[in-house]
């Protein structure tokens, strides 16, 4: 490992100096790993180092560390400051022979901490940033994540000199003249393995049991005012030290001896292996995933087809009601949690939104019509891309938020900013396996917990949901990543990978005598749409079963089809003859369809068959409609047309709605669409990851600002204000004009229109009209500055700005 040095060859004395010695690629890597440091772009490397040491930024950086990098930081937090590399290694391996896994992994962990500006200094003097130490080091009231407590010196702070002398005497040490030397003597005893082992051999067995219970943390315990003899033995010798009345702590030095020098009970230098691996044929995996992809497309289409006519109301607080979610689950023939997933997916893809009306409802967007015209592989790619990027987590629907309120599907509170990252990482782990290979979910969760131990429980829940959703969507098949899923993860278009896996759509069905039709595969869209109106889907899978009923036939007649057209359609698209029962059903419903006519007055009902109206008036079930005769062939009703139609159909009749001109109204299933809506934008927490262009510009700006901040100034009597040069307007103008002629680089103070002061290094090119045009080394570009905003000017020492 190389020793870090600054540009002069000396070891860096501060984090800023170490950052200054780094190449531009290393600075860009730091800003990429910690994007919060870019908001706003630091003015120089000192500002960058200061911002990198703030508590909030450090906490975010620690949350992104893998388990062993975090364990390394935790070990450094309980090590001497500064800490030699060998001492750090000993804290992780203990007194046992070197663990080759730790020996091999420790340089990477140290490099990770250094790259993220959490650690600095050469290898013989490694230093944690002070904020990192404050967050991870133990205190008398808070243990370290390692389970270690405070040192003897920290735990005895404030202890009376007399009590310290009593501890020395009980431990068999000579008395000292002051508390400092007393603490030093006790610390040296506890750090001397041989002497401490000899002392512990004289301890009562119960005392050793107490130490064993506190050994791996938490190191705190409680004692009564009159402790048992074995506890008194430990207290008298400082092996337990009081932290508060009735509270004691195990000193760090004693714990380290009992732990055989190890800071962690179970160091984890390498990630868990993804095992056991189940090998499957990639062709089988792809075929399974393609089947799920087709099911996903038909399910989303079925959901939106249902909601375009009977879209559920939007709750006042947003989202779906429990009743509407249950009804949707019944329509889709799936669990409520799964129904929530399909609704959220359609919403994330921009196919579903609220209509914004007074009685706000969910309905398909105009983009849904465009989506329907795409080939199946393109429609799936649209859904899968939206799923991978969305921050919505439908798996949380039905749970409770922090205030105990129920989380509704499509409602607020379901966004989790970590969800896209977790999905990508889950798929990435599956992609690291051979094609067709799968591992148990627990193996994936264990690897994720090692890679990102912070927030482990919530991330594990997101990972489980990601695995289940990927299987539903067809990104995976039988637990293995399918070919379209690999393309999706790589950022490529997954449609070409899916297209060869999909079966060719069929143009026929098989009609059966039990009033059903079997589609042995996916159907052409016009056929599927017409059949979806004429019959109800009874079961889905590799083959779809449609069932014909009086209601479904009436639905087709309401859409403007005649019995002859329906029979001709079935004859054309069936590989089997139209069964006689189906022909009778269509003709019978068509014969009765429209005999009763419902129109709007309050509403009215007319029929040329007076006997049928007499029968209807005599039927007790018509009482809620409050019918009365206006003419031999006309009845009036207190109910509205929609309510009257629904009531009559529930009684077994087949009424038809008519217009004011007396024509039969044809109902279309695609009647309701929202206004144009864009797909929802995923919720971001903190600044987005910077791209290469932003990183390059930021590094150049920081470097330029650092050159300006550290440039050597010529000695001058020029007054300064707040670190900025201060000269009169005449002197400023004269110096600028001279610099244009001589090509001199100047140091200026500048106050912008918002009143913010800054210092800059410029090379003036032109001075005229009250403005100076110059190459600004700080911004690395040519700029124009009003002279009246320049507080003053001073020359730089030779060759400092070049």
Image (cartoon, rainbow, N blue to C red):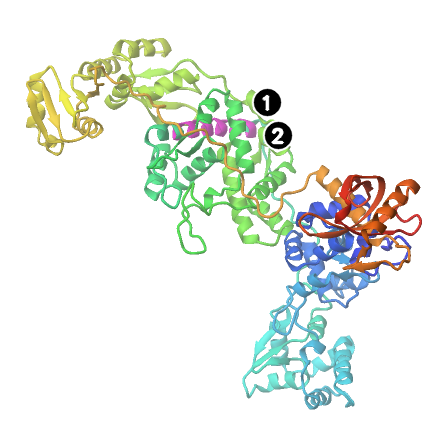
Q: Residue at x 93, y 48 (%)?
A: 799
Packing grade of label 2 (10 A; few <14, some 14-19, many >=20) is some
Q: Which residue position holds label 1?
A: 496
Q: Is residue 333 visible?
A: yes
Q: Which residue position holds label 2?
A: 487
Q: Is 572 rendered above or below residue 489?
A: above
Q: Position of residue 323 (x, y in %)?
A: 32, 42
- The one nearer the camera, 676 or 512, is 676
Q: Residue at x 20, y 15 (%)?
A: 662
Q: Is residue 796 left or right of residue 505?
A: right
Q: Residue at x 78, y 41 (%)?
A: 771
Inspect the magenta stretch and tell me whether residue 291 lies in it.
yes
Inspect the magenta stretch and tell me whether residue 723 lies in it.
no
Q: Residue at x 53, y 42 (%)?
A: 391
Q: Is 236 rendered above or below residue 134?
A: below
Where's the C terminus, which quadrant?
A: top right
Q: Is 58 rendered above or below residue 323?
A: below
Q: Position of residue 730 (x, y in %)?
A: 83, 50
- The one nearer the camera, 288 or 72, is 72
Q: Position of residue 277 (x, y in %)?
A: 61, 40
Residues at circles 1 and 2 in contact by the CB criterion of under 8 Å? yes
Boundaries of the magenta span: 285-303
């Amino acid at each position: 490992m190389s020793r870090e040095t600054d540009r002069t060859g000396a070891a860096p004395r501060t984090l800023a100096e170490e950052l200054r010695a780094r190449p531009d690629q290393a600075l860009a890597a730091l800003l990429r790993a910690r994007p919060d440091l870019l908001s706003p772009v630091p003015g120089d490397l000192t500002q960058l180092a200061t911002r990198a040491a703030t508590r909030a930024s450090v906490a975010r950086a620690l949350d992104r560390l893998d388990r062993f990098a975090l364990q390394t930081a935790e070990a450094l937090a309980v090590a001497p400051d500064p800490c030699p590399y060998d001492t750090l290694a000993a804290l992780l391996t203990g007194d046992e022979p070197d663990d080759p896994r730790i020996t091999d992994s420790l340089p990477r962990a140290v490099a990770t901490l250094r790259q993220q500006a959490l650690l600095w200094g050469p290898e013989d003097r490694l230093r944690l940033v002070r904020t990192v130490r404050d967050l991870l080091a133990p205190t008398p009231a808070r243990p370290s994540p390692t389970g270690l407590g405070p040192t003897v010196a920290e735990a005895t702070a404030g202890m009376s000199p007399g009590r310290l002398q009593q501890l020395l005497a009980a431990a068999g040490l000579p008395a000292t003249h002051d508390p400092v030397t007393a603490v030093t003597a006790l610390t040296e005893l506890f750090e001397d393995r041989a002497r401490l082992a000899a002392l512990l051999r004289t301890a009562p067995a119960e005392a050793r049991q107490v130490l064993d219970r506190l050994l791996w943390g938490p190191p705190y315990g409680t004692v009564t005012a009159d402790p048992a003899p074995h506890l008194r033995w430990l207290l008298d010798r400082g092996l337990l030290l009081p932290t508060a009345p009735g509270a004691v702590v195990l000193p760090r030095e004693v714990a380290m001896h009992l732990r055989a020098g190890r800071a962690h009970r179970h160091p984890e230098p390498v990630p868990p292996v993804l095992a056991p691996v189940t090998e499957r044929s990639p062709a089988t995996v792809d075929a399974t995933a393609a089947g799920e992809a087709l099911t996903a497309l038909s399910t989303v289409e079925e959901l939106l087809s249902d909601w375009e006519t009977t879209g559920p109301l939007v709750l006042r607080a947003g989202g779906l009601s429990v009743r509407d979610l249950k009804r949707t689950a019944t329509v889709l023939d799936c669990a409520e949690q799964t129904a929530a997933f399909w609704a959220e997916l359609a919403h994330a893809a921009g196919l579903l939104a609220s209509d914004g009306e007074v009685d706000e409802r969910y309905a398909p967007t105009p983009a849904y019509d465009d989506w329907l015209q795409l080939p199946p592989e393109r429609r799936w790619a649209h859904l899968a891309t939206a799923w991978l990027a969305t921050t919505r987590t439908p798996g949380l629907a039905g749970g409770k938020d922090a205030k105990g309120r129920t989380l509704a599907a499509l409602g607020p509170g379901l966004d989790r900013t970590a969800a896209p990252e977790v999905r990508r990482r889950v798929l990435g782990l599956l992609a690291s396996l051979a094609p067709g290979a799968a591992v148990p979910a627990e193996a994936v969760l264990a690897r994720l917990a090692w890679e990102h131990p912070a927030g482990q429980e919530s991330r594990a829940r997101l990972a489980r949901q990601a695995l289940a959703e990927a299987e539903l969507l067809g990104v995976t098949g039988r637990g293995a990543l399918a070919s379209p899923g690999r393309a999706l993860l790589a950022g490529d278009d997954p449609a070409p990978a899916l297209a060869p896996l999909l079966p060719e759509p069929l143009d026929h069905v098989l009609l059966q005598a039990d009033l059903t039709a079997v589609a042995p595969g996916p159907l052409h869209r016009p056929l599927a749409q017409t059949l979806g109106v004429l019959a109800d889907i009874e079961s889905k899978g590799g083959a779809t079963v449609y069932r014909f009923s009086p209601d479904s036939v009436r639905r087709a007649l309401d859409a403007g089809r005649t019995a002859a057209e329906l029979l001709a359609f079935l004859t054309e698209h069936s590989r089997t003859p139209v069964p006689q029962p189906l022909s009778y059903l269509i003709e019978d419903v068509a014969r009765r369809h429209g005999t009763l006519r419902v129109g709007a007055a309050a509403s009215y009902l007319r029929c040329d068959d007076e006997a049928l109206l007499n029968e209807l008036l005599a039927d007790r079930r018509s009482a809620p409609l409050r019918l009365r005769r206006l003419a031999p062939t006309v009845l009036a009703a207190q109910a509205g047309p929609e309510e009257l139609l629904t009531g009559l159909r529930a009684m077994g009749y087949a009424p038809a709605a008519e217009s004011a001109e007396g024509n039969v109204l044809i109902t279309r299933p695609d009647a309701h669409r929202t206004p144009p809506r864009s797909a929802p934008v995923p919720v971001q927490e903190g600044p987005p990851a910077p791209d290469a262009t932003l990183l390059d510009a930021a590094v150049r700006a920081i470097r330029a600002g650092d050159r300006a901040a550290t440039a050597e100034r010529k000695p001058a009597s020029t007054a300064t204000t707040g670190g900025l040069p201060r000269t009169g307007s005449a002197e400023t103008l004269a110096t600028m004009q001279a610099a244009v002629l001589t090509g001199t680089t100047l140091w200026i103070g500048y106050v912008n229109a918002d009143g913010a002061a800054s210092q800059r290094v410029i090379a003036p090119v032109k001075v005229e009209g009250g403005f100076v045009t110059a190459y600004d080394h700080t911004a690395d570009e040519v700029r124009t500055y009003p002279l009246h905003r320049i507080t003053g000017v001073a020359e730089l020492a030779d060759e400092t700005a070049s």
